[in-house]
Image: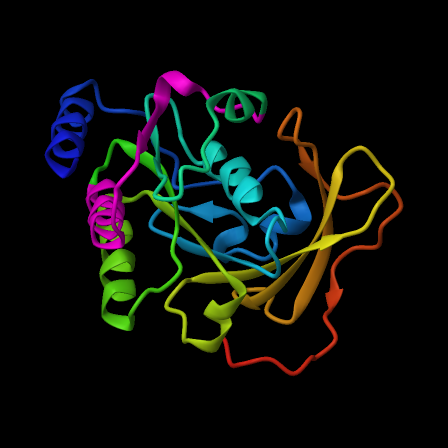
Amino acid sequence: MLESLRRRIGEIESRQRPQVRPHVSSGVAALDALFPDGGLRRGLIVELVSATDGAGAWTLGLALARRVCGEGQVLVVVDEQAWFYPLAAARLGLDLGRCLVVRPAHWRDAYAALCQSLLCGAVGGVIGWCARVGTVDYQRLRAAAERGGGVGFLVRPHEALRSPSCASVRLLVSPIASGEPARRLRVEVLRGRGQGQALTLELDDETGAVHPPAGVAPPATAARTARPSSA
């Protein structure tokens, strides 16, 4: 699996150099305000912590990851859990022709795939599920992203809040009950430019569109609730 990934990455890097932007918009001004430099900049690690199963953190991560892939860049999905469904991804707006899916059998292989992909300058974004990440491993992932220039999206379970994070931005994603067709999510900033703030987003599973619900107030300081440190 890893040898195949190395070969594919080599093929990607041998192509014409892709157009790369220093940072891009998430597509939502209120969300951009929570990131360094007002957008998703190159070399960033974003951690999306899922408050509950099915909270929408993985789908939100995919929606953001597709935006960081500039012209000619590839999105790498490290899919250890086999959650990635191509037809649903295409509805979210992902270009499957520029999407490389890796399905490792074990976490160590998944971690190696994350690192190798982040080191590749032709990879715009990398997303994967990370149940457990040690501090040293996390620092290596961050160094790989800074060197390669891609953006890493690490989707993690709620239990991850018990451990420190080395991510530049850490978001807690919670579902909000809604009668609307689109899903509503509460996104709270645990680490980042807008630390302590929370905003409500609508996520359309059919189109991949992410936007604030009509009539919802801009981000406000989140109520301080007792939870393990996110430092």
Left or right of 114: which side holds 86?
right
Q: Is residue 188 left or right of residue 132?
A: right
Q: Position of residue 7 (x, y in %)?
A: 12, 28
**Which of the 4 quarters of the picture holds residue 227?**
bottom right
Residue at 40 percent across and 43 percent down: it is 81
Q: Is residue 221 left or right of residue 68?
A: right
Q: Is residue 182 left or right of residue 110?
A: right
How many labels, in total?
Answer: 0
Give the percent coordinates (x, y) of residue 206: 66, 25
Magenta includes 63? no
Residue drawn at (66%, 31%), measured in percent from left and top? 205
What residue occupies the far front of the structure in this picture? 105
Position of residue 142 relative to residue 101, above or below, is below
- Which one is in front, 51 or 38? 51
Task: Give the magenta range.
Answer: 92-119
Q: x, y percentage for residue 208? A: 62, 30
Q: Is residue 128 above or below residue 160?
A: above
Residue in view at x 51 percent, y 26 percent = 89
Res 153 visible? yes
Visible residue check, residue 25: no
